[in-house]
Amino acid sequence: MITSLGEKIRVENIKLFDCSRRHDVSKCAAVVKSGGVIVFPTDTVYGIGCDPYNHTAVSRVFVIKARKTGKPLPILASTMKDVKNIALLDYRASVLARKYWPGQLTLVCPLLDSNISSLLVSNKEAVAVRIPGNKCTLELVSECGFLVGTSANISGKAPARNIRQILSSSLKGFDAMLDGGYMTHEKESTIVDLSKKDHSNIVREGAIRSKDIRETLSTGGLTN
């Protein structure tokens, strides 16, 4: 039983961890590495994820979210070096990454690592990647290596900003939760598709405005 925003919520069969305790972050990472599915804080809302190389765990995320397969999910990394091991960052992606990472930008780039679960890959050719700015998330991802990072909600429902909203929702079946407090950002990450050469597409405008993305690309990131 935990208390959140003055309400008591019964928690059954879920391991609860706290971002303020470093060993808790390590324990949560261990759940991921053992094939578990976790809920955790991100830069904007709470996310749900697992080891992107574990196809069974990835499948569970789709089932828990009631999300149709064929709709890929993003992968979080903690360093640019790690990102470059799984995705091809061309000049455009590098410009945006230098400007907005760590942060609220997801880039869809050509896939390099074929060992990643096929459920996460768009047409088996592209993968969505991001380096988060949230300190707790970065610590978690650095211990996991990589982490699937999609919003912790049933597909089509509003994303959650605190653990009370998750535990009182119909999102069930995950193994652990990492409490990072209330997420204050109003919007999810902006998604830019750079998987095709000489063509960029803003899939979703979120925390970073489309006009800022276009300006950064047109100037090579040289403006203030």
Image (cartoon, rainbow, N blue to C red):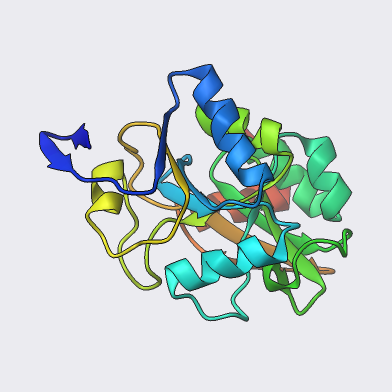
Left or right: 76 in relation to 165: right
User: In the current view of this chain or complex, which residue is farthest to the front?
Assistant: 13
Residue 123 visible, this angle: yes
Q: Residue at x 68, y 72 (%)?
A: 119
Q: Between residue 8 and residue 43, name the one nearer to us.
A: 8
Left or right: residue 179 compared with residue 4 = right
In the figure, residue 28 lies in which quadrant? top right
Q: Is residue 171 left or right of residue 204?
A: left
Q: Give the image location of residue 49, x and y in percent.
A: 56, 53
User: Relative to residue 215, is residue 3 depicted above or below?
Assistant: above
Front one among 106 and 22: 22
For the point 66% across and 66% down, the residue is: 56
Can you give x and y, in whole percent of width and height, for residue 82 in the image? Answer: 81, 40
Q: Examine the rendered structure and indicate whether residue 183 appears above or below residue 13.
A: above
Q: Is residue 189 visible?
A: no
Question: In front here: 5 or 76?
Answer: 5
Q: Position of residue 14 (x, y in %)?
A: 39, 46
Question: Total marks drawn?
Answer: 0
- The quarter in which the C terminus is drawn is top right
Residue at left offset 25%, top offset 60%: 169
User: In the rendered view of the protein, which quadrant contains the N terminus?
Assistant: top left
